[in-house]
Image: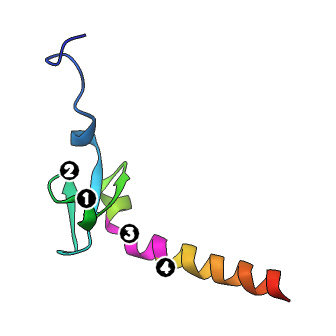
Amino acid sequence: MDSATQPNDSAEEYWFNQRTGLVEKGKQSLAIYRIGPFSSYLEASLALQKIQKRNEDWDESEERWNQ
């Protein structure tokens, strides 16, 4: 398959830009500002909430471990 027929993977991925707070389709900004990839715009827009939830779950897990 040549490059003309290969799908552009990054065009189908969505990223949350921490610096701007915006969702980007494909890799539009520097990697240090991107969170992702996500499979949909909605999923990318909820990136910070997902991270917060994972952090809370991790903290709870550590608390149980240390008891």
Q: Residues within 10 Å of mark 4 (few under 14, many from 20)?
A: few
Q: CA distance from mark 3 to mark 4?
A: 10 Å
Disc 1 marks a residue whose amino acid type is Ala
Disc 2 marks a residue whose amino acid type is Lys
Q: CA distance from mark 1 to mark 3?
A: 18 Å
- Cβ atoms at labels 1 and 3 below 8 Å apart: no
Disc number lying in front (1 or 3): 1
Q: Which residues are magenta?
A: 45-51
Residue 8's x, y, as percent? Answer: 22, 32
Q: Quadrant of the N terminus?
A: top left
- Cβ atoms at labels 2 and 1 below 8 Å apart: yes
Q: Residues within 10 Å of mark 1 (few under 14, many from 20)?
A: few
- In primary-sequence order, the first of circles 3 and 4 is 3
Q: Residue 31 — which label?
A: 1
Give the vertical position of 65 relative to 39 (above or below).
below
Say which residue label 3 marks.
Answer: 46
Residue 22's x, y, as percent? Answer: 20, 69
Q: Residue at x 33, y 61 (%)?
A: 44
Label 1 sits on a secondary structure element that is helix
Disc number lying in front (3 or 4): 4
Q: Residue at x 44, y 76 (%)?
A: 49
- Cβ atoms at labels 2 and 4 below 8 Å apart: no
* Magenta-colored stretch includes residue 46: yes
Label 4 sits on a secondary structure element that is helix
Say which residue label 4 marks.
Answer: 52
25 or 30: which is nearer to us? Answer: 30
- Cβ atoms at labels 4 and 1 below 8 Å apart: no
Disc 4 marks a residue whose amino acid type is Gln
- Cβ atoms at labels 3 and 2 below 8 Å apart: no
